[in-house]
Amino acid sequence: MMSNQSHRRWLILSLLFAILYGVLFWRIAAEDYYSLQDDARQHIFWMQRWLDPKLFPNDLIADYFQSLSPFGYRTLYRVATALGIHPFLFSKLLPPILGIVSTIYGFYLCLRLIPSPVVAFASTLILNQSMWMWQDLGSGTPRAFAIPLLLAFLYYLSKRALWPSVSVVILSGWFYPHLVLISVATLAMRLLRWGHRRIELSADPLDYHLLAWGGIAGLLVLLPFMISTSPYGPVVTAAQAKTMPEFVTGGRHSFFGRPWLDYWLGTRSGLFPVLNPAPIFAGFLLPVLLLFRERVPLLLQTTRELGLLLQFMVGSLGTFLLAHIMLFRLHSPNRYTHYSARIILSIATAMVLISLAAALGQWLAAVIPFRQLSKRLSKLAVGTVLMGLMLYPASLKNFLDVLYASSDRRPLYEFLAQQPKDTLVASLSKEANNISSFVGRSVLVSPEHSIAYHTNYYTQIRQRVFDLIRAQYSTDLGELQKVTHQYGIDFWLIDSNSFDLESLDNNRWLRQFQPEMSDAIARLKQGQQPILKQLIPACTTLRETFKQREVLLIDATCLLSK
């Protein structure tokens, strides 16, 4: 076993890579003035109300996403705002910090499973690459807290620390409630032991105390979700979802209608939505190597706490299956295995690669007669693996897949920012996704905010989209004026693709709204000119062209006066 000083050196190296990836992320986040992570446009835009309470008055979309915000997450951002840090800026500062926290907990957790700082370094390196190659950590949304919280829980559980473990369960409920079920299920698995060729109950009272107190903490922290009635519910049922275009292949929440293997292994419904980096697949070999560990000497150092990974895996699988049984009351099933798989496979991959490299070096040392060379072969083999892992991101065209949405519609945003704070923009364009975030003005609908899980919310959103489609593509001025007056629209926002047949045919979001969208396309194919298009010359307030794509802002007052 290596010294604590050696542990610290490898931990420092782990932190250096975590910091490096964080700095690379900050470069992306700060690249454009108008930029925000894709999911942050849902979960953070409404926080501008803390800066100015007059923003988003009577805004269904802002009210809905504010209601979804977990207590701890909301409180953290509220504190940051009170300290003078804009919520958007905080969402960019937070991810690298969470990456560092994940690295520390991940490093020491791995040491609890196998006392090899080299393996611990490799596991945190792989985990950091995995986190930054997907959008969750970089979003600064509740999902960004999933891996650090799970790692903290597993670390304290490996140390058999009762109250720290229970405390993390509570924090999980405050930041990302899905983790509570995973944690409690893992605690339940701790009661089972494999002995004398059969499963036995644990004889350790601490395991029962952990489950009891963890279960009580989990119940209390989830109680508000269980007893409260959301004005935007109920949650859509599986039977309802199967009839909705939003939940079938090609829909906003594509879930049903995919091949069997993809359904159980991929995206929202499957075990492994995304697995990266590529070396992480080596982790699946760990169970095989453990069966022949006498031939892989490094694995002989694994501790009894290695069983925690199996308990964690079974607990995650159990909640995954429960989420399938209770669709969609526990939200998407993948949320119960997505983060668990990254943690387990990162540790397993490090064990596999480092132990095989060390074993290869030792085997070569045994067959090579040169004594001085043979002593270094094991270290050389391990060093080669580590170098390959460290350089792996350089082989990728795009390493940090953080899905940052950026825009250079500065004239549009500056103009809308000068309008009254209760201004309402109506649009079927993707540009509507950015208005609430970059301008702080309400939109009637947008693709990004059209979430179909809560029926009372989505029924209103869906009706709004139907009305906008009919009005935007109608040849009747009365229909256009009726919808404009009904919703109190101040501006219509359209772009160069709004009346383009090919673009409309390929618009996956709008294709969900039938038969209105098909009727609109049919009228355009017949050569009928929508009245809104005819009034563009007379009522356009702002016309902006960027990268050969034109955006038009049409004054609703002008439309109503015709």
Image (cartoon, helix red, strand yellow):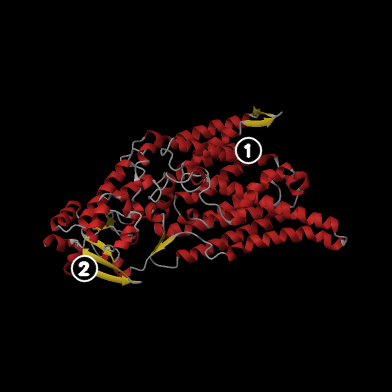
Q: Is residue 550 above or below residue 463?
A: below
Distance of mark 2 from mark 1, alpha carbons? 65 Å
At x 34%, y 36%, the residue is: 229
The first of marks 2 and 1 along the sequence is 1
Q: Position of residue 236 (x, y in %)?
A: 36, 39
> How many residues crowd around disc 1 within 10 Å: few (fewer than 14), some, or many (20 or more)?
some
**Residue 203 percent coordinates (x, y):** 66, 27
* SS class, disc 1: loop
Q: Residue at x 13, y 59 (%)?
A: 560
* Observer able to see residue 541: yes
**Residue 107 in view (yes/no):** no
Looking at the picture, tell me which residue is in the foreground, 179 or 217.
179
- In the picture as drawn, the residue positioned furthest to the left comes out as 562
Residue type, label 2: Thr
Residue 541's mark? 2
Of all residues shown, which one is farthest toward the front?
526
Measuring from the top left, give residue 562's x and y in whole percent.
11, 62
Q: Are marks 2 and 1 in contact (CB under 8 Å)?
A: no
Determine whether, in the image, residue 297 is placed left or right of residue 30: right
Q: Mark 2 falls on what kind of element?
A: strand
Left or right of 532 in this view: 193:
right
- In the rendered image, residue 104, in percent from the top left (x then y), is placed at 60, 52
Q: Pointer 2: residues within 10 angstroms few (<14), some, or many (20+)?
A: some
Circle 2 or circle 1, nearest the eye: 2
In front of the other: 56 or 526: 526
Q: Give the labeled residue for mark 1.
A: 160
Task: Specify the label residue 213 is tagged with.
Answer: none
> What kind of residue is marked 1?
Arg
Q: Is residue 553 left or right of residue 257?
A: left
